[in-house]
Image: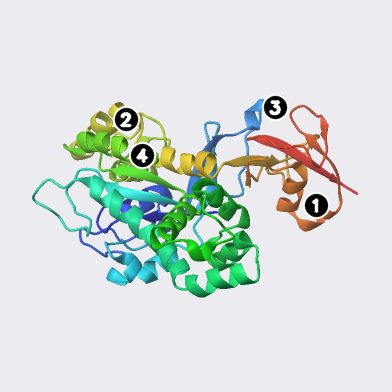
């Protein structure tokens, strides 16, 4: 699973990326500070199941961490260079940056909700409407998809009509590099009502609309309303929520989250990502650090309930992409061969079965599947049993 960070230059993308991953990323107050994409690991925060057994246990994650009963399960994140108007026509090296996003499963659009930068990432002295940044980026992503279709459309449409090809299958092949499936195309066809048997009759507007809807389904996007600690941000956020009801918009402060995580790393405070408070645990904290932490507390945590960074990652994975977390475990013991308690946790698409999970773990487990056992209830479940979020499952093979 790969989550791509997108947005105009200089809106806080790299700060969001670093706050979510604590990876080293260049953070600078000028456009195109990021050129090469940054790869890192972010974490989805879920309740661990280790305390639900008698006696309660403390898990030992192989990847990620578990703190106070909260399991942080890793997901890959990608921060690409800022996109500017005309990116789909290669302005600002747009083609290169869009190509970096091909394998992303979903996008997080970072927006400077304070209105202090324009759609090109340049500081502005006048009040700038962040809705314009949201509009242009949606347009550029849709034009990116439309451009892929339009390059081949005349020959493609005529050929599929003449040989009576499966239109949905043919479009999916054309977009195979962007993880588009035949079912995705069928959904868009049903929504638009366009005739797949007569694609040569589609006009340019229909083709663009079709491509845009395909992008929304195959690369869903959430909007991170960044810099919410600034003066004009709250007013701009209300306007954006009204203007883009089809998108989830979450207030956030990437800089605030980064400050809290760095203070935690240095042992100054105790803070859990996604929480609305922190605890100062160091006597060495100075007045400047206290003031900065108090500012984040008053202007972000108390006002919005969190910095928003963790909430955004969770919403993308668990709600937009509809993944569930499953723990492989044994009914007789929760440890692996090395004595680690519940070392692993895997994400599967909602609706996955016990057999799907067996294949996720290893091909041999799927091929030799006999049954599975719910480690909480000790009930035997068959291969077609649909799993639930946070299930603990043991696979029995022949």
Which residue in the structure is indicated by mark 2?
304
Front-most of residues 30 and 339:
30
**Label 3, label 2: how many angstroms apart (C-alpha)?**
34 Å
**Label 3, label 4: how many angstroms apart (C-alpha)?**
38 Å
Which residue in the structure is indicated by mark 4?
249
Is 318 positioned to the left or the right of 278 in the image? right
**Label 1, label 3: how many angstroms apart (C-alpha)?**
27 Å
Q: Is residue 123 above or below residue 115?
A: below
Q: Is residue 175 above or below residue 45?
A: below
Q: Residue furthest bottom?
A: 155
Q: Which one is earlier in the sequence, the residue at label 1 or at label 4?
A: 4
Front-most of residues 285 and 132:
132
Which residue in the structure is indicated by mark 1?
366
Q: Residue furthest left?
A: 125
Q: Where residue 53 is drawn, which disc sits there?
A: 3
Q: Residue furthest top?
A: 54
Residue drawn at 12 percent across, 45 percent down: 127
Q: Secondary structure at mark 3?
A: loop
Q: Where residue 352 is drawn, which disc sits there?
A: none
Q: Position of residue 209 (x, y in %)?
A: 42, 55
Q: Position of residue 100 (x, y in %)?
A: 43, 66
Is residue 314 visible to the viewer in this orientation of the structure? yes
Query: Quick one: quadrant of the N terminus?
Result: bottom right
**Label 1, label 4: how many angstroms apart (C-alpha)?**
40 Å
**Label 1, label 2: how many angstroms apart (C-alpha)?**
45 Å
Q: Which one is earlier in the sequence, the residue at label 1 or at label 2?
A: 2
């Amino acid at each position: 699973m790969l989550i791509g960070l997108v947005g105009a230059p200089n809106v806080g993308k790299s700060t969001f990326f670093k706050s979510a991953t604590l990876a080293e990323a260049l953070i600078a107050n000028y456009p195109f500070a990021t050129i090469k994409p940054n790869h890192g690991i972010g974490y989805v925060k879920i309740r661990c199941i280790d305390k639900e057994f008698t006696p309660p246990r403390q898990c030992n994650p192989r990847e990620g961490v578990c703190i106070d009963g909260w399991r942080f399960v890793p997901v890959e994140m990608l921060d690409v260079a800022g996109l500017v108007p005309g990116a789909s026509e290669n302005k600002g090296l747009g083609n290169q940056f869009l190509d970096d996003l091909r394998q992303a499963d979903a996008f997080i659009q970072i927006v400077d909700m304070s209105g202090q930068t324009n759609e090109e990432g340049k500081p502005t002295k006048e009040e700038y409407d962040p809705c314009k940044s949201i509009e242009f980026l949606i347009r550029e992503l849709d034009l990116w998809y439309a451009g892929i279709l339009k390059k081949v459309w005349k020959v493609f449409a005529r050929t599929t009509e003449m040989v009576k090809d499966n239109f949905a299958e043919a479009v999916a092949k054309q977009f195979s590099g962007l993880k588009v499936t035949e079912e995705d195309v069928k959904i868009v066809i049903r929504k638009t009502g366009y005739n797949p048997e007569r694609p040569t009759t589609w006009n340019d507007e229909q083709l663009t609309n079709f491509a845009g809807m395909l992008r929304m389904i195959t690369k869903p996007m959430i909007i991170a309303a960044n810099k919410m600690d600034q003066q004009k941000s709250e007013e701009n956020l209300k306007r954006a929520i009204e203007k883009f009801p089809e998108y989830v918009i979450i207030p956030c402060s990437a800089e605030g989250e980064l400050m809290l995580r760095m203070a935690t790393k240095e042992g100054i405070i105790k803070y859990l990502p996604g929480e609305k408070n922190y605890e100062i645990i160091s006597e060495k904290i100075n007045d400047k650090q206290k003031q900065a932490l108090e500012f984040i507390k008053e202007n972000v945590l108390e006002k919005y309930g969190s910095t928003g960074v963790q909430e955004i990652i969770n919403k993308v994975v668990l709600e937009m992409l509809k993944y569930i977390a499953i723990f492989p475990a044994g009914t007789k013991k929760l440890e692996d061969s090395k004595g680690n308690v519940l070392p692993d946790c895997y994400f599967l698409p909602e609706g996955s079965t016990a057999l799907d999970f067996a294949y996720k773990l290893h091909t041999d487990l799927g091929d030799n599947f006999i049954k599975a056992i719910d480690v909480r209830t000790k009930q035997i479940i068959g291969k077609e049993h649909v799993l639930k979020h946070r299930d603990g499952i043991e696979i029995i093979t022949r």
